[in-house]
Amino acid sequence: MNDPIAVSLQRPVEAVRIPSGEVISLPEGISVVISQALGGSFTIYLPAEGGMCRINGQDADALGLPVPTLDLSKASGRSLEEQIWEQLRDCYDPEIHVNIVDLGLIYNLHVEHAEGGALVFVKMTLTAPGCGMGPVLAADARRRIASLSGVKEAVVDVVWDPPWGPERISPEGRRQLGMDEFLTV
């Protein structure tokens, strides 16, 4: 979805305010504008309130859209760590519209192979310490990792050290943001 789409909610739905992370209930019939549909979640604008929210993919029907499924087709022939990175590339910052890997939010990924499946540990950060979306993004990453065959448990911790800075954005992220001329690696 490249262009914003105005819709009326077809049923009540819970949404998460951006950037506070506050969970709110939106009533059926309210007008919203879908501004982003990446990675199976939706960023919406609420014209009546002037704010943004995130709606989870499993609630796509409230927007009149099909419920997206996790794309596990890329897993064939790839190591578990490669599959995990691919799943993390499908987690998007709802305000910036770039995935958390290319934004440089993933600080560490560690896989421990154990009986019954792998234990996966991820340390990630956010672009701003006051952003309430940390638990939402961490839960999305955890859900995606846990969906992979061979993963027993996924732990995703939000950390603040070292502080995030725009120099952490990958070349692909800079390209998506139109920042190539402003940052160098």
Image (spheres, rainbow, N blue to C red):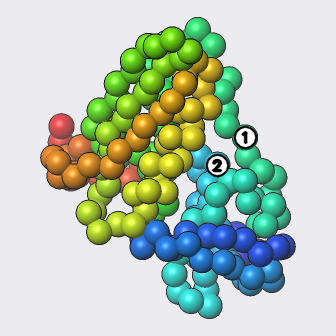
Q: Earlier in the sequence, mark 1 or mark 2?
A: 2
Q: CA distance from mark 1 to mark 2?
A: 7 Å
Residue at 26% x, 63% y: name it: 129
Mark 1 residue crowding within 10 angstroms, few (<14) / some (14–19) / many (20+): few
Q: Nearer the viewer, residue 143 or 105?
A: 143
Q: Amino acid at mark 1?
A: Thr
Do we see residue 65 in this rendering? yes
Please say if 23 is above or below 162.
below
Specify the label residue 11 is tagged with: none
Above or below residue 48? Residue 165 is above
As helix, strand or loop, the secondary structure at mark 1 comes to loop
Residue 109 placement (x, y as % from top left): 34, 29
Q: In the image, is residue 131 above or below residue 168?
A: below
Q: Position of residue 85 (x, y in %)?
A: 45, 29
In percent of width and height, residue 38 lies at 59, 50
The answer to the question of whether label 1 and label 2 lie on touching residues, with beta carbons closer than 8 A, is yes
Viewed as shown, does residue 164 lie left or right of 109? left
Residue 43 location, x and y as percent?
A: 58, 64
Amino acid type of disc 2? Gly
Q: Is residue 3 left or right of residue 59?
A: left
Q: Which residue is mark 1?
A: 69
**Residue appearing at x 46%, y 52% in the figure:** 137
The foreground one among 29 and 38 is: 29
Q: Quadrant of the N terminus?
A: bottom right
Q: Which residue is mark 2?
A: 40
The residue located at (79%, 67%) in the rendering is 62
Locate the C terminus by quadrant: top left
Residue ID at (72%, 71%):
13
When asked about the image quadrant of residue 81, the answer is top left
